Amino acid sequence: MDSILIPLLILVAVIAGVLLLIRSFTKRSAESKADLAAANAPKDPVELAKESAAKLNQEQHRQLYSLIAQGQGMAAIKLYLQATGEGLRASRNAVGALAAHPQPFTPEAPAKDLLADDDDEPERFPYRYRAIVSKGDVTREVSSNMLNDEIYGRIRTLAKSGDVEGAALALTRHSDINIKQAREFIELLGD
């Protein structure tokens, strides 16, 4: 009986060890699958757009939106990929979010409120900014050296939120068009 007892105890110990290894392996596998699923879970597109825009400098931001406006999605993804060093999938998702939810360029340092209703003259920039909006066969353009991505983004936000009059007043303040032309531009922008 002693001759059978020792091999039987060894067999039970080996089976117990194998079961513990299997349990440990399945637990790790489940944890890594959960971590992978959490990492690949889709982010809120608006938050993704804000985070993505924050990774670009002003020139990259301008070039990216220029490519998006021209319908050159692949070139925009390539630009974003080169600018940030993120992967292809992350760059594709970021450009998609930026196209769906446009973000104005916001410099790292907090800027003064550029749409404030004060008596100061608006800041003049060393370049002319062109904003173009169209619907069907109607196209409107505003070109001014008192506009930039941030100001235009705030005007668009006002228009999208339903404050057409506020957006039109801000546009007239930062350009050389009259209120009637600004309202026509904002009406097309709001659609």
Image (cartoon, helix red, strand yellow):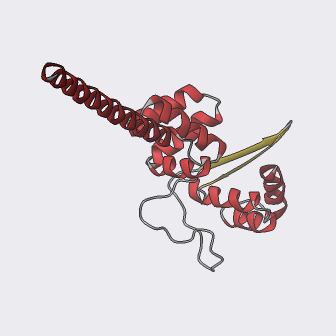
Question: Image height check: is 178 above or below 89?
Answer: below
* Residue in the image at 54% along x and 47% along y: 48
**Whole-percent x, y for residue 27 in the image:** 38, 38
Instruction: Identify the residue at horizontal 70%, vertical 56% (top origin).
Output: 156
Instruction: Decide: is 98 above or below 109.
Output: above
Q: Position of residue 100 (x, y in %)?
A: 66, 42
Query: Looking at the picture, how far across and down is residue 5, in whole percent?
Result: 18, 25
Along the line of sight, the residue nearer the viewer: 174 or 55: 55
Q: Could you say which is closer to the camera, residue 103 or residue 111?
A: 103
Looking at the image, which residue is at 60% across and 37% down?
96
The residue lying toward the viewer, choosing from 1 and 177, is 1
The residue furthest front is: 1
- The reply to whether residue 175 is visible in this rendering is no
- Relative to 155, residue 136 above or below: above
Q: Position of residue 79 (x, y in %)?
A: 47, 33
In the rendered image, the vertical position of residue 132 relative to residue 18, given as above or below: below
Residue at 40 percent of width and 33 percent of height: 82
Q: Residue furthest bottom?
A: 119
